[in-house]
Amino acid sequence: MTRADAVAAVRNPLAFIAARWTPTPRTVQRAALAALVMSVLIVVTGGAVRLTGSGLGCPTWPKCTDDSLTATSEMGLHGAIEFGNRMLTYVLCAAVGWAIIAARSEKPYRRGLTRLGWAQFWIVMSNAVLGGIVVLVGLNPYTVAAHFVATSALIAVATAMWQRTREGDAAPRPLVGKAVQQLVWVLVGASVLLILVGTVVTGAGPHAGDSSEVERMPLDWENVTKLHAVLAWIVVTLTFALWFVLKAVDAPKGPLNRTRDLFLILLGQGVIGYVQYFTDLPELLVGLHMFGSAVTWIAVLRVLLSLRERPEAELPDLPVQSYEATSASIAGPR
């Protein structure tokens, strides 16, 4: 590597890599999918921290203790679980970084795709700080709820990026009418409300995340749980109605299949929810329900994103010299 190359790599490493590497579309798709999978996995491991009472296994932040950056043997299993979840954040960062690099290096350069990758990065960084605040305030239920909501936002952006890797950059073309689009937006809104009330159920419920006395939201847990169930049935009803509407208007298979998938996932999530309620919230079922929440949210977003198509943008006919100049400018620093 020449000195000029070294300077260029330091000044703009992404542009340096992009100028020398062009990933295949499948590589970009896999990178985006890896980031999405990791965003779901961080929900599962975060749930494991709470359900095993390991939320204060590392009692401070950013160190695990005042004297140690890592968990020690004296801290036992709780310290190992909490510290392991913190370390998984670095794996998530690596997955998001890989998605950014792959998107930035794709030719032609797709600015919107790269921005979705960077949006994930900043959400991860913000949520890491919020996670530290959760520990420092002793698992305050409102900060725990905000931590989960931020992760749901991360999943939303990761899902959008994964979908965009399989599309072109032309203007989106709707596949259904405006009335159907409005129905889906109502479904999305109801799903967001379902997630928010779910965090309140958690914040008022018995699984505080630590074996010691932890503040809970001052609400009647039974009533909040019933409200959560009502919202779940509203989402199921809207999904069922959407499927019939799509059949009635002879919609393409994409929206129909995504709506069917969402309906089946909701049924499974509902079964888990009712079983855990009537069996006094066993930790394993609560963890499965948290995983199901993330999968359900992805399925809702896939329904929304299936309502339009984005073909490949048409490139103008250029002389060979002009095309080479355009390619060079794409690969150059930005």
Image (spheres, grey):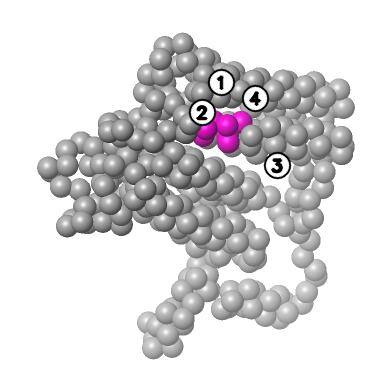
Quadrant of the frame with the C terminus: bottom right
Q: Which mark is residue 219?
A: 2
Which residue position is annotated with label 3? 305
Disc 3, SS:
helix
How far apart marks 2 and 4 lie (CA) works out to: 18 Å
Query: Label 2: how many residues lie within 10 Å, few (<14), some (14-19) or many (20+)?
Result: few
Tell me the mark number nearer the camera, choosing from 3 and 4: 4
- Identify which residue is drawn at 52% across, 19% down: 222
Q: Amino acid at mark 1?
A: Asn
How far apart marks 3 and 4 lie (CA) works out to: 22 Å
Query: Label 1: how many residues lie within 10 Å, few (<14), some (14-19) or many (20+)?
Result: few
Q: Which residues are magenta?
A: 194-202
Q: Which mark sits nearer the N-terminus, 2 or 4?
A: 2
Q: Amino acid at mark 3?
A: Leu
Disc 4, SS:
helix
- Identify which residue is drawn at 46% across, 81% down: 11
In the rendered structure, the answer to whether residue 158 lies left or right of residue 65 reads: right
- Does the residue at mark 1 contact the one at mark 2 (Cβ under 8 Å)? yes
In the rendered structure, the answer to whether residue 327 lies left or right of residue 149 reads: right
- Does the residue at mark 1 contact the one at mark 4 (Cβ under 8 Å)? no
Which residue position is annotated with label 4? 231
Query: Label 3: how many residues lie within 10 Å, few (<14), some (14-19) or many (20+)?
Result: some
> Picture coordinates of residue 202 (x, y %)?
47, 30
